[in-house]
Image (cartoon, helix red, strand yellow):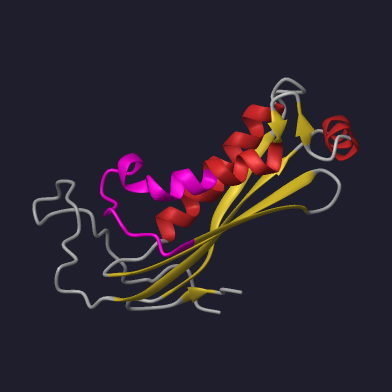
Amino acid sequence: MCSMSRPTAKLTHLDPQGRPAMVDVSDKAVSAREARAECRVRFPADVARQLHASDLRSAKGGIVDTAVIAGTMAVKRTSELIPFCHPLPIDGCRIGVDWDGENVLRIECSVRTTGRTGVEMEALTGATVAALTVYDMCKALSHRIVLGPARLLGKRGGRRDVGTLR
């Protein structure tokens, strides 16, 4: 497993004068890129029991199905949400949602592309928007639902690989 931070790292979205700027990727080689991220949704115990009993269905519909659709849509629109993300063709997107214990839903998003820049932000956006959708669909039961952490689990392609991909 590689380290997530580098001691000599510097911010890349700044120009020489320190102003915000999009990274120029025109000199980078086109390669296969993949990233995997997760976000967790922690429910109060009574809410988790209700969700287990309802098989994750609410008055608004299937919670997991809706979260998967919302997360996938978010992956495809990441460059519209994050100012310096490049628009990317998405070759593949998978969102999985499953219980991690009695009270926590784990949402994982894997994204693939072939391009000059990675899809870490797309994977993180997909996982977090799916989690936000779960919150939206369950907030009538409680506002004590907690989102996070959201984190990058791994990426492959580009200059360095980080974390793990399954």
Q: Which residues are magenta?
A: 71-92
Q: Is 87 in the magenta?
A: yes
| Residue projecting furthest to the top | 140
Q: Is 121 in the magenta?
A: no
Query: At x 67% / y 36%, what residue is drawn?
Result: 146
Q: Is residue 155 left or right of residue 56?
A: left
Quadrant of image for the C terminus: bottom right
Query: At x 37% / y 47%, what residue is drawn?
Result: 78
Query: At x 69% / y 43%, what residue is drawn?
Result: 64
Query: At x 88% / y 30%, what residue is drawn?
Result: 46
Location of residue 58 in the rendering, given as x and y in whole percent from the top left corner = 76, 29
Q: Is residue 93 left or right of residue 82?
A: right
Quadrant of image for the N terminus: bottom right
Q: Is residue 13 left or right of residue 31?
A: left
In which image quadrant can residue 157 be found? Answer: bottom left
Location of residue 131 in the rendering, given as x and y in whole percent from the top left corner = 61, 41
| Residue projecting furthest to the left | 17
- Count of number-bearing discs: 0
Image height check: is 89 above or below 82? below
Location of residue 156 in the rendering, given as x and y in whole percent from the top left corner = 44, 75
Image height check: is 104 above or below 27? above
Of 137 and 22, the residue lying toward us? 137
Image height check: is 67 above or below 122? above
Q: Is residue 96 left or right of residue 19?
A: right
Of 49 and 160, the residue lying toward us? 49
